[in-house]
Amino acid sequence: MKIRLKGTNLLPVALFLLIMLAVPVLGAQEETLNETKYADTSGVISVDKAEEVAAYSIKEISGSISDLSEWKDATVELSTIYYDFDGNRSAYSFNVMKNKQQAGYIFISATKDNYPVLEFSKGKIPNEIPELTIRSKSLAKERADKEDLTVGEMKPLYYNGSAEGHEYPFL
């Protein structure tokens, strides 16, 4: 048996198919408009928002990693703002504080392009370990002395969500 659609029957069917195809597209446009309306479109996370993420994350970490269960009632304090090679904010480090003592640290991304939690650990933030900062400054000074320059203010670097460093401008 063959079914033939006459010209007058074809129009409602074609119109129905067209409407069905348009529904997902229109819904996606509305979602995008709402996302733009309620989201920070710059892609940069504020220090305050990063602090909220850090505080929430240490509670989650303390409940799921037994070695860090002591972080249960800990708080976070901003330590350092890190930058990428282009001078844009890339990460924030927070000291995890328990009973006014440092119990560890957590790094939070400063951009929406990366995972929110970049790293966490017991101990000190590498940027706060005197042996490391003194060594990097002395290497920069050696290089500057060879070229008869002076070393400027250190800028902490954090790139690719996994590597830290220091940048010293030569003046």
Image: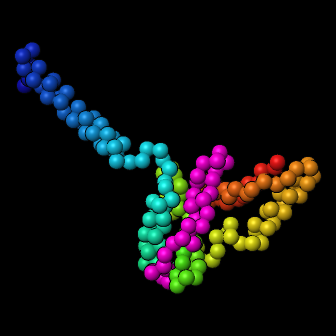
The spot of residue 51 in percent (x, y) is 48, 65
The spot of residue 140 in percent (x, y) is 83, 57
Q: Quadrant of residue 13?
A: top left
Kindly tell me whether residue 34 is visible in this rendering: yes
Residue at the image position 67 percent from the left and 56 percent from the top: 157
Q: Quadrant of residue 96?
A: bottom right
The spot of residue 40 in percent (x, y) is 42, 47
In this rendering, the answer to whether 49 lies above or below 88 is below
Q: How many marks?
A: 0
Kindly tell me whether residue 66 is visible in this rendering: no
Q: Residue furthest top?
A: 7
Taking depth in this image into account, of 84 and 113 the one nearest to the observer is 84
Question: Is 136 on the left or on the right of 103, as rendered?
Answer: right
Question: Is 136 on the left or on the right of 21, as rendered?
Answer: right
Question: Is 64 on the left or on the right of 77, as rendered?
Answer: left
Taking depth in this image into account, of 7 and 141 the one nearest to the observer is 141
The spot of residue 170 in percent (x, y) is 81, 49
Residue at the image position 84 percent from the left and 63 percent from the top: 138
Quarter of the picture holding the N terminus: top left
Taking depth in this image into account, of 55 and 14 the one nearest to the observer is 55
- The colour scheme applied to this rendered structure is rainbow
Q: Is residue 78 magenta?
A: yes
Q: Is residue 137 magenta?
A: no
Residue at the image position 44 percent from the left and 65 percent from the top: 52
Q: Which residues are magenta?
A: 69-95
In this rendering, the answer to whether 92 lies above or below 73 is above
Residue at the image position 52 percent from the left and 85 percent from the top: 99
